[in-house]
Amino acid sequence: MNVFDLISWVCLLGGVFFCFVGSVGLLRLPDFYSRMHGASMTDTLGAALVFIGLMFQAGLSLVTVKLVMILFFLLLTSPTSTHALAKSAFDAGLKPWVKKQKDVIQ
Amino acid sequence: MFMAAMIGILATIVLAVLRTLLGPTVFDRILAINMLGTKIILLVAVLGFLLGRPDFLDLALIYVFLNFIGIIAVLKYVKFKNLATVNPDNEEVGNERV
Amino acid sequence: MLNNLILGVALYAIWLLWSGHYSLLLLSLGAISCLTVVVLVRRMGVFEPERQHVHLLLPLPLYWPWLLWAIFVANLDIAWRVLHPKLPIAPCVFKVKASQKSELGRVIYANSITLTPGTVSMDVESDTITVHALTEKSASSLQTGEMDRRVTALELERES
């Protein structure tokens, strides 16, 4: 077992751990807007670490280029769809759950 | 080790499906489905490495775009109850295209 | 016309990179599909010259390392809060100023806000962005305006 394998496994399992924590957040957090933060966590660090782990397995090859491109497009599309979701929920009149009521903007 | 990663991702998918079933609003369900799509991309990529066939990455890339387009289409349908609406906020554009 | 040519060449380069097979049949099929995409994009009119701010994209790789580090730190914070038995969160909604001049600069700023866990941009207007934050800490780290300053610096790189 060489050092690259070790790094790749640490990244892979770390990514899966963050994905899992994100989905726990999706279940535990109290309202729609805060659940979005849990989902955004799995989309960024979870996915990025899994792909970095796979890159260490692939080494310098065309496969690594493909992995980098998939990660790039994932990081480009996921905030766009999250923003579209947040905006349509906001426009539909879904109120955010807040501790201090004065923070809500009407 | 790829097997362990796949089991972890599958557990994540189970939790996301649970949120999809629990609801309570339609946006919660769309959010959970969006996350499910991201997890499926990861699953396909890891599966390609597990089977030793990196061609699976092409499928993963297609899923990235399908996920994005699908979410936007579903949101548009939820908002306008119609997929053919061009731009309801801007009358001129709407009239021009119809 | 030049724009369409650049788009076509870029599409074909990406197609060659992804395909990995170089027989005559597959090369011509790729060329046909790239040509179809260029025609479709031209009909849709989404690739107009006045909407392009390509000079913004050149210094972007300098911004990414800072953004990735910010995402990493925010991720650790949110993961700790989600796993904490008492769930120490205090969601709030507030507005931040977006000092970018171009549309693309604002898009980059709003996407960076959404990409960072703990903050999601809910509404983008001409000079303000409505943000939903999960905790006081993530709200205050955005309100220092460092991200805004860095994205605006990308924009001014070429004009000054």
Image: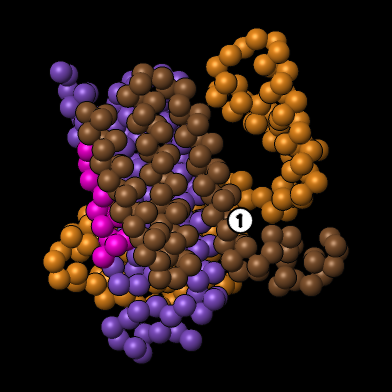
- Given residues A75 and B82, the one toward you in this image is B82
Asked whether residue C136 is in view, the answer is no
| Residue wearing tag 1 | B73
* Res B49 → quadrant: top left
Question: Looking at the magenta stretch, what is its main secondary structure?
Answer: helix
Q: Is residue A22 magenta?
A: yes
Residue C134 drawn at (x, y percent)? 31, 70
- Provide the residue span drawn in magenta: A13-28
- Given residues C125 and A11, the one toward you in this image is A11
Element under disc 1: helix
Residue A40 drawn at (x, y percent)? 37, 56
In the image, what residue occupies the spot 54% across and 76% down?
Answer: A92
Is residue C92 left or right of C158 when viewed as pictured? left
Q: Quadrant of the N terminus of chain B?
A: top left
Residue A11 drawn at (x, y percent)? 24, 36
Chain coloured orange in the rendered structure: C
Chain coloured brown in the rendered structure: B
- The relative height of residue C93 versus residue C4 in the rendered view (above or below) is below
Q: Quadrant of the C terminus of chain B?
A: bottom right
Name chain A's colour.
purple
In the image, what residue occupies the spot 80% across and 65% down?
Answer: B93
- Given residues C147 and A91, the one toward you in this image is A91
Q: Residues within 10 Å of mark 1 (few under 14, many from 20)?
A: some
Asked whether residue C154 is in view, the answer is yes
Q: What kind of residue is marked 1?
A: Ala
* Res A48 → quadrant: top left
- The relative height of residue C51 versus residue B92 in the rendered view (above or below) is above
In the image, what residue occupies the spot 36% across and 29% down?
Answer: B47
Residue C111 drawn at (x, y percent)? 47, 57
* Res C131 → quadrant: bottom left
Count of residue discs = 1
